[in-house]
Image (cartoon, rainbow, N blue to C red):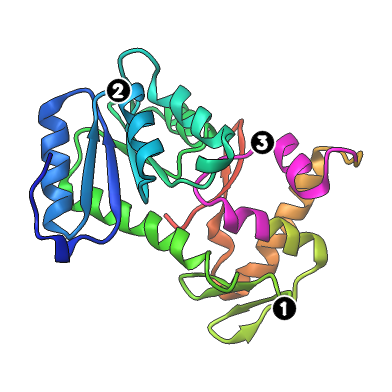
Amino acid sequence: MFDTDQNLMKDKILIVEDEEAIRDMLGYALMKEGFECEEAADVEQARTTIESEKPNLVLLDWMLPGMSGIDYARRLRSMPETRDLPIIMLTAKGAEEDKVRALDTGADDYITKPFSTKELVARVRAVLRRYSGNSDSGVIEVEGLLFNPETYRVSADGQDIDISPTEFKLLHFFIGHPERVYSRSQLLDQVWGENVYVEERTVDVHIRRLRKTLEPFGFDKFIQTVRSVGYRFSTR
């Protein structure tokens, strides 16, 4: 367990990593930035820790003894009490298909080993900001793009954006699930509904329209195509 000044503690980070040296390195780096840290060497320890006191974010290693980080992320997303728990996946796997797999199982972000502690802290803060920013009034702000589901308005630097109802729903879903990749069929189920028959190419049409709507304001680049998979909303 780590020792630190209690006054500096803000968000609690659970580090799930089977290598003790890496856990220590991550904990030291995060605590220097004012975070409180808990450790777990495997999924069983992680489960016990989360049941005792839910953390603000989980750093989850892909390769764990027993149950893998990928499977555990999927399990966390399937349970109501941890469905909205922020997850950053840590792994040595750097291929595009591995990143897609990690994000598609429910991770909010993905960082490849080896990485700098500065990058790690920046990613942690970004994910925590994303969640805290979405929890107050329902208004979501992403780099100047303001989305208000209550007033049904989208604006860029104070200027209203004229957007159709379908594109509004599509943007609402994307902006609420950043960095995660969704196939056309998944988008159809989530945005149009499972009982509505719409061809998958309809998604492409509305993606193009949404990009065209956002293009004058420079936000079209946030709607990214992942070849042979689908689409994601990302500011990177």
The location of residue 68, given as percent across then percent down, is 39, 19
51 relative position to 209: left or right: left
Q: Earlier in the sequence, mark 1 or mark 2?
A: 2
The magenta-colored residue range is 172-195
Q: Which residue is labeled 3 in the image?
A: 183
Up/down of 124 relative to 167, above or below: above
233 relative position to 167: left or right: left
Please state, as top left, top right, bottom left or bottom right, where the C terminus lies in the image.
Answer: bottom left
Say if mark 1 contacts mark 2, CB within 8 Å: no
**Mark 3: which amino acid?**
Ser
- Distance from label 1 to label 2 (Cα)? 44 Å
Q: Which residue is labeled 1 in the image?
A: 151
Residue in the image at 57% along x and 50% along y: 177
Residue in the image at 37% along x and 51% along y: 56
Please state, as top left, top right, bottom left or bottom right, where the N terminus lies in the image.
Answer: top left
65 relative position to 150: left or right: left
Which of pointers 1 and 2 indicates the residue nearer the eye?
2
Q: Earlier in the sequence, mark 2 or mark 3?
A: 2
Badge 1 marks a residue whose secondary structure is loop
Q: Quadrant of residue 91?
A: top left
Q: Residues within 10 Å of mark 2 (few under 14, many from 20)?
A: many
Which residue is most to the front? Answer: 52
The location of residue 104, given as percent across then percent down, is 54, 34
Q: Quadrant of residue 199?
A: top right
- Residue 42 is tagged as 2
Which of pointers 3 and 1 indicates the residue nearer the eye?
1
**Mark 2: which amino acid?**
Asp
The location of residue 155, given as percent across then percent down, is 62, 79
Whether the magenta-drawn stretch holds residue 87 is answered as no
Q: Residues within 10 Å of mark 3 (few under 14, many from 20)?
A: some
